[in-house]
Image: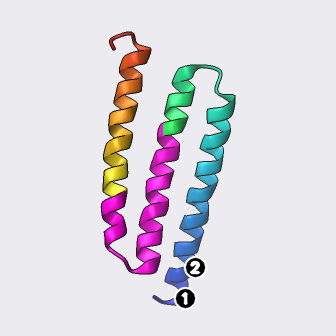
């Protein structure tokens, strides 16, 4: 990759880390449980993005499979918690 592409790669990685930190703060402070669920979902999306960045940086495609499985489990978890919070589970 060229220097500009590497700079954009690092900048995007730090933006994702900042989003993860802000979501963690919302998860800890969230006044309602719905806020905490949304923050947890944002943290898992940021985690998936970090796994993809690691896969791109390391040049290993197998990490993308890990990211896909993590995304599926995160989706199922959020659906289960949302059903519990609305009283349907």
For label 2, the residue is 7
Position of residue 20 relative to residue 30, above or below, is below
Position of residue 73 measured from the top left corner of the image (x, y, whole percent):
34, 43
Q: Compare residues 50 and 73 and report the one nearer the observer.
A: 73
Position of residue 14 measured from the top left corner of the image (x, y, whole percent):
61, 64
Q: Compare residues 16 and 4 and report the one nearer the observer.
A: 16
Q: Which residue is rendered at x = 53% and y = 81% of the image?
A: 6
- Residue 53: assigned label: none
Position of residue 47 relative to residue 87, above or below, is below
Question: SS class of the residue under badge 1?
Answer: helix
Position of residue 75 relative to residue 65, above or below, is above
Q: Compare residues 65 and 53 and report the one nearer the observer.
A: 65
Asked if the residue at tag 2 contacts the one at tag 1, i.e. Cβ–Cβ closer than 8 Å, the answer is yes
Q: Which residue extends farthest bottom?
A: 2
Residue 58 inside the magenta-drawn segment: yes
The C terminus, quarter of image: top left
Overall secondary structure of the magenta stretch? helix
- Mark 2, Cα crowd under 10 Å, few <14 / some 14-19 / many 20+, is few
What's the magenta region?
Answer: 41-66
Q: Quadrant of residue 26?
A: top right
Position of residue 2 measured from the top left corner of the image (x, y, whole percent):
49, 90
For label 1, the residue is 3
Question: SS class of the residue under badge 2?
Answer: helix
- State how far apart marks 1 and 2 are (Cα): 6 Å
């Amino acid at each position: 990759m060229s220097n500009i592409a590497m700079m954009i790669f690092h900048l995007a990685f730090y933006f994702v880390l900042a989003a993860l930190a802000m979501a963690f703060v919302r998860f800890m402070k969230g006044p309602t449980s719905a806020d905490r669920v949304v923050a947890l979902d944002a943290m898992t999306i940021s985690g998936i993005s970090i796994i993809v960045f690691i896969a791109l940086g390391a040049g290993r495609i197998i990490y993308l499979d890990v990211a896909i499985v993590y995304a599926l489990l995160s989706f199922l978890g959020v659906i289960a918690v949302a059903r519990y919070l609305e009283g349907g589970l």
